[in-house]
Structures are given as C-alpha cells and as structure tokens.
Amino acid sequence: MPILPLAITDLKPLLAIAAADTTADADLTLLLAAQQPALEYSLDPAILAASAGSAGLMATLRLGIAEALAGEYLRRQARAPGATDDFHLGPLTVSASRTDNAAQMGERLAVLGLKRLEPFGRAARQVAVDASAGLPDGSSKAPVLLQTDLTASNAATPSLFDGAFFDLPLDDSSLGGFR
C-alpha cells in the first residue's frame, strides 16, 4: 500500500497528456500499483514518516516518484511493438524519430526523478552512517567513497528543461513535442 498520495492525475502533466484523455489511464494505474511501492521502499523510513508533517518534503518526494514513473511510462511506450517501425507509402515516409525522442525524454525524466529522490534514500542514509562511524582502524576520516554531502543534492536540483542537468541543447526539436 503506497504511503505517499500519488494518482495518475499527477503523472499526466509530466507526460503532456490532457486530463480528460483516458486512453493511458489503465497503463498508468498498473505502473503506479507496481512501481510506487518499490520506489517508496527505497526511501528512508524516517524521511517517509517526517514527510507527513512537511509540505515541502512531501511535494519533493511525490514529484521525484512521479518523474521516475512518468519516465518509465515513456520508455515503455517507446519499446512497444511497432513504436520504432517506419512506414513508407510512395514518397511519404513516417519515421520513428519522435518515438526515439520519447525514449530519450523518458530516460531523462526517470533519471531526474531518481536523482531528486537520491538524498532521501536508504542508501544515502547508510553512507552517512558509515561515514560518521569512522573506520575499523579507529581513524575518524572516512575514505573518499564514503564522504557524501547529502545536503548539496538537496540544494538545487536542476530542471530537466534548463539544459544544465543533461548538458544538451533543449530546443523544440530535441523535446520531440514533449514540453
């Protein structure tokens, strides 16, 4: 049973699907039911408990999960049978380039959502605990791999559309019709 309140109406704006369009509702409902609990399980239980009292934290967690799920939905749509086929009729060719862009956007959106959730995950907390506990030889300095600034990830999560996160030019053609 999911802890964070999330519905398909939270995913549709990320997918550029009109609220009144119900063609994707069944797929989105199945995706929510299958993957939202797994994403919530990856979060630190203490943070999930604290999210009830913090509107900002709740919004951040919900947005991260919604982005990850919307990205997975786009990636699945790009893998659907026939999604990458070209159609030729005389001189007219209908190609799958828009679908390729959808797959890339799905990947980017999923990564953005997972990056947004990363500082709140069980693994991030374990790294912080390992780093503060010190080393078996008694020294208090953790190796470089264990030193993680968990607050820096929270400070400014770049937007998918500002170009800074993926260092790609994001003009209308690279968005593939998704805004």
Image (cartoon, helix red, strand yellow):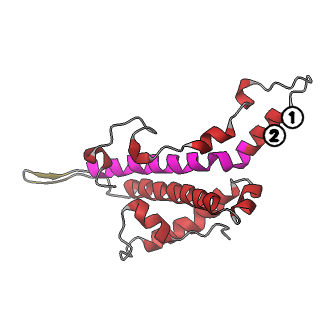
Identify which residue is drawn at 59% across, 65% down: 34
Residue 157: x and y in percent read 53, 44
Identify which residue is drawn at 71% across, 43% down: 124
Q: Residue 82 sits in which quadrant?
A: bottom left
Which is more toward the observer, 131 or 31? 131
Q: Main secondary structure of the magenta part?
A: helix
Local SS, label 2: helix
Q: Which residue range is magenta in the image?
A: 97-124
Query: Would residue 161 be found to the left or right of residue 31 on screen?
Result: left
On screen, residue 27 above or below 132: below
Amino acid type, callout 1: Ala
- Does the magenta run of residues contain 138? no
Identify which residue is drawn at 61% across, 70% down: 5
Q: Looking at the rendering, in which quadrant would you find the C terminus? A: bottom left
Residue 25: x and y in percent read 44, 73
Query: Would residue 145 be found to the left or right of residue 84 on screen?
Result: right
Q: Residue 41 sits in which quadrant?
A: bottom right
Mark 1 and mark 2 residues within 8 Å of each other at the beta carbon? yes
Residue 118: x and y in percent read 63, 46
Give the alpha-carbon distance from disc 1 to disc 2, as whole Å.
6 Å
Label at residue 133: 1
